[in-house]
Amino acid sequence: MNNDIIYMNRAWELALQGWGRTSPNPMVGAVIVKSGRIIAEGYHHYCGADHAEVDAFKKAGTAARGAALYVTLEPCGHWGRTPPCTEAIVKAGIRKVVVGALDPNKLNNGQSLKFLRRNGIKVEQGLLSEELTRLNEAFNCWITKKRPMVTVKIAQTLDGKIATLNGRSQWITAAFARNYAHRLRFGFDAIMVGINTVLKDGPRLNTVPAKPIKKIILDTHGRFPARARLCEGTRPQDVLVFTGKAAMKRADVQVIEAPLYEGKIDLKWVLSFLGKMDITSVLIEGGGLMAGEALRRNLADKMMIYMAPKIMGEGLGSVRGFVPKALGEIAYLKEMSIDKIGEDILIQGYPHVYRHR
């Protein structure tokens, strides 16, 4: 295997150590190589901490002079919460920089690489770029679309049902898959459900391991209960109830009056609002109507469908309210993956509406 790929793969592994902790910053890993061996490693631990490059430089010290730097994402070239990494690279005496993905932020987006070249540093870009761009897909969406990336999670039977006709849904999938899904919550900034899910299921919407996460509730008619399980042990600023009813006043949650779209809370407006709060990723766990609304309005960026080996027959569908007029308008998943999670199956992919030609 090419040594460059080995070093960049190691930087990728390091970047993943920041999973669920760096938002609204991206995950980044860095490796410093000199005389054919790694002399220092670093990654971005959490928002506000040293960037990956600086983390590695502090470990390498003066040995970084004349070395090569492998970094998963284009180094920042502007002041933010921390100084520019490009200046730190020049100061460290790095002779070559190998970059995986470009930063979609217009303040960088290739400009940092030009700065490094002007300062006599050899720059190579594009190694594992597709994979490393996907690594920070939520950050990329937030930067380019000014809203969080939306992942729709569904737990359904083989015939696409998420609940009985009277609304009972516990439990479609087995305990192993449910625990797996709870652990995946850690990688998100927020979890979103509708008020019906709150009233029927009483979810806690916590992560494993525990971390502060925004809990988003869409409540058109102001029915959020006086005592909700999801408020237990949660800071008031972390529960956001979007409602079309202005009168609600609560000390235990944030109540935000939102506009309506076709009689329901405007999901697009809510996502824009969350984007301004530096929320880069939202996991929708809110049932068939919310899944359908996200697909109908082209706001679903990714799907995670847990499928149990069960057949319900009559029941509530996993996607409702999304009504294509013809087969040429149905949604399909691209870049799909299928994994066995215990006795259940997880299908992941990126939804697109098929346009018949």
Image (spheres, grey):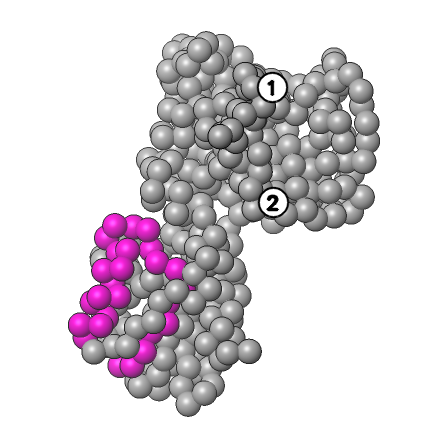
Q: Is residue 102 left or right of residue 187?
A: left
Q: How many other residues sit within 10 Å of disc 2, few (<14), some (14-19) or many (≥20)?
A: few
Among the two numbered marks 2 and 1 on one chain, the one whose residue lies closer to the N terminus: 1
Residue 38 screen position, x and y as percent: 46, 82
Q: What element carries label 2?
A: strand
Residue 334 screen position, x and y as percent: 55, 42
Residue 115 lies in magenta, yes or no? Answer: yes
Pick whichever, 8 or 266, lies toward us: 8
Total numbered badges shown on the rendered structure? 2
Residues rendered magenta in the picture: 93-119
Q: Is residue 133 visible?
A: yes
Specify the quadrant of the image occupied by residue 182.
Answer: top right
Pick whichever, 282 or 215, lies toward us: 282
* Residue, disc 2: 336
Rendered view: 313 above or below 262: below
Q: What amino acid is at disc 2?
A: Met
Q: Quadrant of the N terminus?
A: bottom right
Specify the quadrant of the image occupied by residue 26.
Answer: bottom left
* Residue, disc 1: 320
Residue 191 screen position, x and y as percent: 53, 34
